[in-house]
């Protein structure tokens, strides 16, 4: 008989919410960092906002969502919620702050050394989670994708740690080989997590047809093999365009997803525009990638590719997911606390649709302003201003949701 | 008994329908539903109500059949 995953130890509500709240707060230093981008590449003034966005904003949301997903999708019980809520959460914030402060201080070794110690502890904690996920009997496409995504997050961290060993501790390792591998692994982790999540979210919330069975079975592996082949090629012949191997699954994922979104049976759904915008930006990334062959070292192309993947595609999906997942979690925790047959408030009582649509407009406005920043990096202030506007909207909407939740919780029969 | 297809509904509607059926059903009654994905968040609520459950993926992977036996 096939073993059944255990779904009775989901994390407490405060665990993912704490990560989500931290993510919103990292928008503030991100906005500030955009005011000092120069027109060089590679440049610390680009590395700083990239890491604030990747680790501070996206990393927090993705880690919070990952901890929730491994429990409710793959049935891996959350055995030490306090450790994940306080220990790992604090390590993540401190490690991100140390790294980014080290970048701000012109690669100051003490901060990079501190960051390397903190990220090493995080890598150890995440290895334990990966071990639990690997042992889970869940065999669906999302669980397979989550395993691979977490594996790639660990690989990204390890490659980042290797670079910190060079920059902070003076190890004589080849930085020019480590950097493209780190970038490739980071790209792989973001895409793999989105692929795993999309298989659940698109049919469930957007009422699209399911992703094709061959993609559900082999999409994540195909992407991983392409990344491995690209990485092997980079080590063997660094001057060849090995990134093109990673281009095919990325373009395929964008095309498949856009086709599914067209077939959504819920065109009035507010989450749909978020997904259209995100996957249009992924398609733009796929269209821009071949330019690397002719414009390899151009700073504008580096900024454009980074924005399309992180600020465009991932940030749009992540903000949309927050508006869907936070009210759902609030509703679910109330339902779990309520006695049978007790009616709990509907999800839109926590966060109304209009709130989600306002933030989508802010994200839409971000895109032309990001294009302006890509073209003229000294014009980062309009982009920074709208990011601050997005932060204000998120804090206002989720504070209102928290007030609604507390009121509903008090109204439960004792 | 053919399972009730809840794939056209947005969460948490399928969960509410299933929990309503469970709360209003009779002892030993069997229920079956087609859902877009395995309903992880529903499982603790079913266990709270001591409902037996089993699930299987549709052959084309377009959904999951959830079978329940009420206590």
Image (tube, coloured by chain):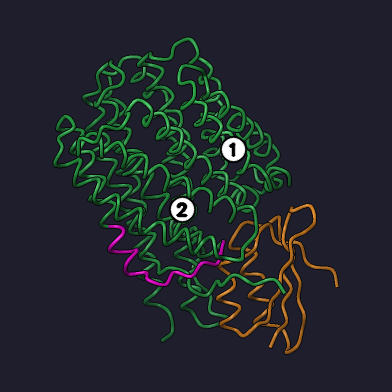
Chain colours: A green, B orange
Subunit that carries the residue with mark 1: A
Q: Please tell me whether residue A165 belongs to the stretch shown in magenta.
A: no
Q: Nearer the viewer, residue A102 or A254?
A: A102
The image quadrant of residue A272 is top right
* As drawn, A15 above or below A288: below
Residue A246 x %, y % = 55, 30
- Is A56 on the left or on the right of A278, as rendered? left
* Residue shown at 72% from the left, 61% from the top: B64
Q: Residues within 10 Å of mark 2 (few under 14, many from 20)?
A: some
Residue A255 x %, y % = 64, 31
Q: Are marks 1 and 2 in contact (CB under 8 Å)?
A: no
Q: Nearer the viewer, residue A134 or A276?
A: A134
* Marks 1/2 same chain: yes
Subunit that carries the residue with mark 2: A
Residue A301 x %, y % = 41, 17
Quadrant location of the N terminus of chain A in the rendered image: bottom right
* As drawn, A91 above or below A152: below
Q: Which residues are magenta?
A: A74-89
Give SS at disc 2.
loop
Number of labels in the image equals: 2
Q: State how far apart marks 1 and 2 are (Cα).
A: 42 Å
Q: Nearer the viewer, residue A236 or A284?
A: A236
* As drawn, A374 above or below A361: above
- Residue designated by label 2: A352
Quadrant location of the C terminus of chain A in the rendered image: bottom left
- Residue designated by label 1: A225
Q: Residues within 10 Å of mark 1 (few under 14, many from 20)?
A: some
């Amino acid at each position: 008989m096939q073993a059944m995953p255990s779904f009775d130890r989901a994390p407490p509500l405060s665990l993912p919410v704490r990560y989500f709240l931290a993510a919103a707060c990292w928008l503030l230093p991100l906005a500030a960092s955009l005011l000092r981008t120069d027109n060089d590449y590679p440049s610390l003034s680009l590395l700083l906002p990239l890491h604030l966005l990747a680790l501070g904003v996206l990393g927090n949301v993705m880690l919070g969502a990952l901890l929730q997903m491994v429990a409710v999708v793959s049935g891996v019980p959350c055995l030490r919620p306090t450790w994940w809520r306080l220990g790992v959460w604090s390590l993540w914030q401190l490690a991100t702050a140390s790294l980014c402060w080290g970048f701000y201080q012109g690669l100051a070794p003490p901060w990079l050394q501190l960051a390397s110690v903190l990220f090493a502890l995080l890598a150890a904690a995440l290895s334990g989670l990966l071990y639990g996920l690997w042992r889970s009997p869940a065999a669906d496409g999302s669980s397979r994708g989550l395993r691979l995504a977490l594996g790639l997050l660990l690989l990204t961290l390890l490659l980042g740690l290797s670079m910190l060993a060079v920059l902070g501790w003076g190890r004589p390792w080849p930085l020019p080989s480590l950097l493209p591998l780190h970038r490739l692994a980071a790209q792989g982790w973001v895409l793999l997590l989105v692929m795993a999540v999309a298989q659940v979210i698109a049919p469930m919330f957007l009422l699209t047809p399911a992703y094709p069975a061959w993609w559900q079975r082999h999409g994540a592996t195909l992407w991983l093999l392409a990344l491995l082949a690209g990485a092997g090629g980079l080590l063997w012949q660094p001057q060849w365009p090995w990134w093109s191997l990673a281009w095919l699954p990325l373009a395929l994922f964008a095309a498949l997803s856009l086709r599914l979104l067209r077939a959504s049976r819920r065109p009035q759904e507010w989450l749909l525009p978020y997904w259209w915008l995100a996957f249009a930006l992924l398609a733009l990334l796929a269209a821009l990638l071949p330019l690397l062959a002719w414009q390899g070292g151009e700073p504008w192309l580096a900024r454009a590719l980074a924005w399309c993947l992180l600020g465009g595609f991932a940030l749009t999906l992540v903000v949309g997911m927050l508006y869907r997942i936070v009210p759902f979690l609030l509703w679910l925790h109330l339902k779990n606390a309520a006695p049978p047959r007790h009616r709990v408030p509907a999800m839109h009582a926590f966060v109304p649709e209009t709130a989600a649509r306002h933030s989508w407009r802010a994200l839409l406005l971000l895109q032309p302003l990001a294009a302006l920043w890509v073209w003229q990096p000294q014009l980062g202030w309009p982009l920074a201003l709208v990011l601050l506007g997005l932060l204000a909207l998120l804090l206002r909407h989720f504070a209102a949701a928290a007030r609604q939740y507390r009121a509903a919780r008090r109204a439960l029969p004792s | 008994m053919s399972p009730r297809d809840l794939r056209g509904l947005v969460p948490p509607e399928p969960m509410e329908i299933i929990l309503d059926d469970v709360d209003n059903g009779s002892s030993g009654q069997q229920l079956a539903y087609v859902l877009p994905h395995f309903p992880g968040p529903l499982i603790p609520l079913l266990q709270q109500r001591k409902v037996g459950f089993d699930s299987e993926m549709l052959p084309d992977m377009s959904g999951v059949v959830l079978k329940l036996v009420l206590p």
